[in-house]
Image (cartoon, rainbow, N blue to C red):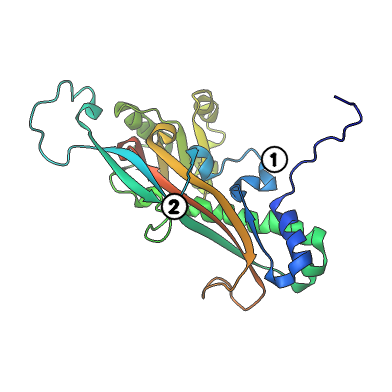
Amino acid sequence: MSTNEPAEQPPLSPGKVFAQAVAKEGAKASVEFSHTITEAFPGFKRRPRIAVRGLFKVVKAEGGKVKYWHETPPQSPPTVQVEDVGLRPEAAFEFHTDLATLKPTTAWIQVPPALLDDPETLATFIDFRLLVRLCTAENQALARGRGGDRVRGLLETPGITRLPARSDPVSSLLAACDRVEQMGGSADGILVNPADYYRYFVGKGGLLSDLTSMGVRIARARMVDPGQVIVGDFTAAATIFDSGRSSIRFATPPPGIFPRDGLAVCGEIHEALVVHLPTHFYVASLA
C-alpha cells in the first residue's frame, strides 16, 4: 500500500449532511439515513452517560414487522404439577410468539431563518439540538411510550411487577435486583431519575462501584418518575428491533409542539421495543 494514499475521511455528521441538503434545496430539504441517528449525538463521545437505548440489546430489523418470542406465568391452571417450581418459578412459564410493528419516534426544533445561509452553524445546531431532542424522545418512548401508533415503553408493558419501598432507597434498589435473580435472570440495568441518582446513590459508600463491577449499567433519565426505579435483565429479557432508518426534514409540526409558529425541522427514527420476559423487570418505589 502506498504511503501517499489519502487517509479515509470520517463520515459526515447528520447535521452536516442536512446542512449540505439545505444549501441545495433550502427550506424543502429532506435527508434519509441508513443508520439510527440517535447514536450519532456528539455529546456521547465526551460524556460517559448511557441513554436508555444503551441498556438494551439492539437487533437490526428488516421490514416493518418482526416476529418475537415471549414468556409469561401460566395463563390458566396447569394440567400437571411442574417439578421444582418453588425453586425455579420460570419452570412453569408458558411460551408464546407474536408480531411487533416498528413505529416512529420523532423530535422537533425550530430553525432561526438566518441559519439557512450559514451551513457550519446550521450543522452544529442540528447535531447538538435536534439529535439531543431525538435522544430525549427515544428515552421517553422506551421508558413510558404509550403504544398504539407509537413505541410501547417498559412502564406501559403488561406483566411488569411493582414493588413497594423497603426501609431505605438503597435497600429498595437492591431488593429489586434480588427479585430479578430469583426469577432466573441477572439484573444488568437500572433506569433511574437523575434526582434520585444524585440524592440516594452518588457518594453512598461503594454502591456505584459495586454495581459497575457486577456489570450493571445505569441510565439516568427524567422519564422515570422521582421516587421510582426500573430494574431488569435488559440483555436477556427485552430487545430493541431497529430499522436502521432515520430522517431529518423540514415539515409542518402538529399542534402543541411549539409555543409559536416558526420554521420547523423534524428528526425521526423507527423501532420497536419487545419484552420477552416481563417477569424479569421490576418497578420499585425507593422511599
Q: Can you tell which mark lies on residue 64? A: 2
| Disc 2, SS | loop
Q: Is residue 222 among what the camera can see? A: no
Q: Residue at coordinates 34% horizontally, 31% vertically from top-left?
A: 180
Quarter location, residue 67: top left
- Mark positioned earlier in the residue sequence (1 or 2): 1
Front one among 144 and 13: 13
Q: Indicate the position of residue 6 as horizontal and vertical percent values.
A: 87, 35
What kind of residue is marked 1?
Answer: Lys
Q: Indicate the position of residue 59 as horizontal and vertical percent values.
A: 48, 39
Front one among 2 and 210: 2
Q: Indicate the position of residue 41 as horizontal and vertical percent values.
A: 66, 48
**Against 269, is 88 above or below?**
above
Residue bearing mark 1: 45
Quarter of the image for the N terminus: give it.
top right
Q: Residue at coordinates 15% horizontally, 21% vertically from top-left?
A: 83
